[in-house]
Image (cartoon, rainbow, N blue to C red):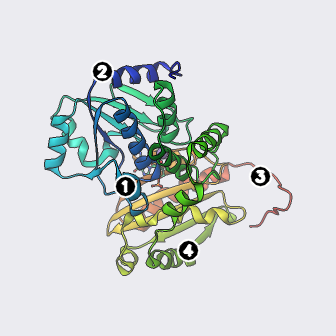
Amino acid sequence: MSRTPETPARAELHAFLARYQRFLLTTHINPDGDAIGSEVAFARFLRAMGKTVRVLNDSPTPHAFGWLAADVPVEVYTEELAETCFSEADALIVLDTGNKQRIGRLADHLSRHAIAIAIVDHHATHDGFGKVNVIEPSCAAAAVLVYELMHEAGVPIDAMAADALYVGLATDTGHFRYSNTDARALRMAADLVGIGVDVAAVTARVHQTAPAGRLRFFGEALAALEMRHGGQLVVLEVSPEQFAKHGLMGADTEGLVDMPRVIEGVEAVALFSEVEPGKVKVSLRSTGRVGIDGVCSRWGGGGHVHAAGVQMRGSREQAKAKIIPDLERLLSELPPAPVVAGRGARA
Ligand code: 5GP
Ligand code: MN
């Protein structure tokens, strides 16, 4: 059964879905679990409404999420393929980003095709380039929005959509450990488990896919971690030589920046990942007390209050010189950490 859309933007999106027949879906470059999970679930949603749908991304699907695309092919950009997809579609739905530049090479095709655009996203930083923009930073994952939109439309969530939505929700909340984990996220998880999601099996599929080289690479990076600002800031870096030595690519750093969160007293973690010489991907994380998205948006990046990123040109040293002083300033402004029983302060 359908229910009243929660916001006017959501009502506009439902009208948008009703108006068009042939949909193209996309997401951000270097897609994560929420990006792929939201696409797959949205594709099931559209198909259930009798629409035709194709999914095309700038970057390949990481191995850990490939199984989600068994029934809904997730295609990878070539110029010819993009031209075909754009000319055959009436409407484009962009999931898990609201930044035009984050959809990568697909952005180049927007000016050439009069295609209607809708955005379904949960990032605080966005440029809302859609005709319809459903952008709700209060949602823990884009998958939360997709799930609620399916409920509003009265479209049943099948087993494949449930797995996809669970992957999006679980990966974006760090498996229900990060500060975006709220009652809504946990209720959604409970509902998905009720539909049939096998938590252990899905988690294993997503997290037991690493080659041994990835752990050696993590080991090297972690062995060299630097503690700054009295133990509140962890700085990690990886070089192009380390990527080459282990035969890895940029997406293989996934999870690395989250590991130092376990160190007692840490407020923020910064990873400077130089995939190719002169191209540094900065990833920032907060353990909850400090908002770090502004540090990235200042340099053209963005993300969420507690997880953000930016791509920078130049050396790792140059990127560190731009980012670390801002982080240290934020940390200096923090009030003393509350004393938690059994958690003594350590510098
Ligand atoms: P990660 O560090 O895992 O790549 O990204 C953390 C968060 O920041 C994600 O929500 C991601 O979408 C966002 N993010 C990462 N890099 C960029 C970037 O270059 N630009 C923007 N706008 N957001 C980013
Ligand atoms: Mn997301």
Q: Earlier in the sequence, mark 1 or mark 4?
A: 1
Q: How far apart are the two marked residues, 3 and 4, measured between alpha carbons? A: 27 Å
Q: Is residue 78 left or right of residue 241?
A: left
Q: Earlier in the sequence, mark 4 or mark 2?
A: 2
- Which kind of residue does numbered mark 3 sit on? Pro
Q: How far apart are the two marked residues, 4 and 2, measured between alpha carbons? A: 51 Å
The C terminus lies in which quarter of the figure? bottom right
Is residue 122 or residue 206 the one in the foreground? 206
Question: Picture quarter containing residue 230?
Answer: bottom right
* Nearer mark to the viewer, of 3 and 1: 1
Residue where numbered disc 2 is placed: 19
Question: Is residue 288 visible in the rendered structure shown here?
Answer: yes
| Mark 2 Cβ and ligand 2 under 8 Å apart | no
Which numbered disc covers residue 30? 1
Q: Secondary structure at mark 1?
A: loop
Q: Residue at x 64, y 39 (%)?
A: 187
- Which kind of residue does numbered mark 2 sit on? Arg
Q: Earlier in the sequence, mark 3 or mark 4?
A: 4
In this view, 183 is above or below 240: above
Q: Is residue 12 left or right of residue 262?
A: left
Q: How far apart are the two marked residues, 3 and 1, measured between alpha carbons? A: 37 Å
